[in-house]
Amino acid sequence: MMELLTSPEAWAALLTLSALEIVLGIDNVIFISIIVSRIPERQARRARQIGLALALVFRLVLLSALVWLIGLTRPVLTVSSFEFSWRDIILVGGGLFLLAKATHEIHGEVEAREEGEEQGKAGSAFFWVIAQIIVIDLVFSLDSIITAIGMAQDIEIMIAAVVIACLIMYISSGPVARFVAEHPTTKMLALAFLVLIGVALIADGFQFHIPRGYIYFAIAFSAAVEFFNVLARRNRRKTRS
């Protein structure tokens, strides 16, 4: 352990892996922000806390099962010319879940359901929200930990990077959720991101890797444009008042 603390290579690996885990965690934060937006604020805060705590637990549990996890990348099913491992099956399933959930939420936004109706449903939806967070936490945790295994050799570095990333996800989830809830157009944009991420997960499951840099650049560019739109609308309201 002391050797790792005094090793420049270990610190470099920790910083690199932490940054990567934070980037991979953006997907998780966006999903949780969307999924909790239809329940009351007090329950939403508790759901975020439970969801991110589960994300940390799942990642640490998966790290403790490295041998079994590495075996998930071995083919277990062949369909036509495609060979699927358990990892591929989970990624495809998670991608389909994201597509279905994002489409359902977009439909709800377009239909413009009454706020009272939403609040009435939200009161009994807390455990359903938690169940959905658990499912998507498992999917994102699997992809995240397999990436960590490929980048670092010491489990101590992997655990430290995962804990750092989950802490930053927890700190950022509240502001992101509030911003999304307060700006409907931003919520629609976030739902579009979920569709994009779902397609990327399905592509990964079919061994067609879409470089995440393209996806995150598109997200960052769109978010920057929407940020300036929000500022412009706020300035126009101030001018009128």
Image: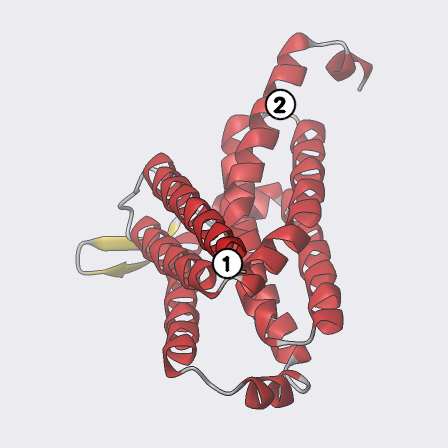
Q: Residue furthest right?
A: 2
Residue shown at the point (42%, 76%) measured from the top left = 109
Residue shown at the point (61%, 65%) measured from the top left = 134
Residue shown at the point (55%, 45%) measured from the top left = 25
Residue 97 placed where, x, y %? 42, 68
Q: Is residue 79 above or below residue 125?
A: above
Q: Are marks 2 and 1 in contact (CB under 8 Å)?
A: no
Q: Earlier in the sequence, mark 2 or mark 1?
A: 2
- Which of the two residues, 142 or 216, is positioned nearer the viewer here? 216
Q: Is residue 217 above or below residue 37?
A: above
Mark 1, other Cα within 10 Å: few <14 / some 14–19 / many ≥20:
few
Q: Secondary structure at mark 2?
A: helix
- Which of the two residues, 123 or 70, is positioned nearer the viewer here? 123
Q: Is 94 placed left or right of 83 in the picture?
A: right
Q: Is residue 200 above or below residue 110?
A: above
Location of the N terminus (image quadrant): top right
Residue 81 placed where, x, y %? 18, 54
Number of numbered tags placed on the structure image: 2
Q: Indicate which disc residue 51 carries.
A: none
Residue 166 placed where, x, y %? 67, 44
Residue 58 in view of the camera: no
Mark 2 or mark 1, whichever is nearer to me: 1
Q: Amino acid at mark 1?
A: Arg
The residue under label 2 is 15
Residue 38 placed where, x, y %? 58, 75
Residue shown at the point (68%, 61%) measured from the top left = 48
- Which of the two residues, 123 or 65, is positioned nearer the viewer here? 123
Image quadrant of residue 63? top right
Q: Amino acid at mark 2?
A: Leu
Q: Indicate which disc residue 237 carries.
A: 1
Location of the C terminus (image quadrant): bottom right
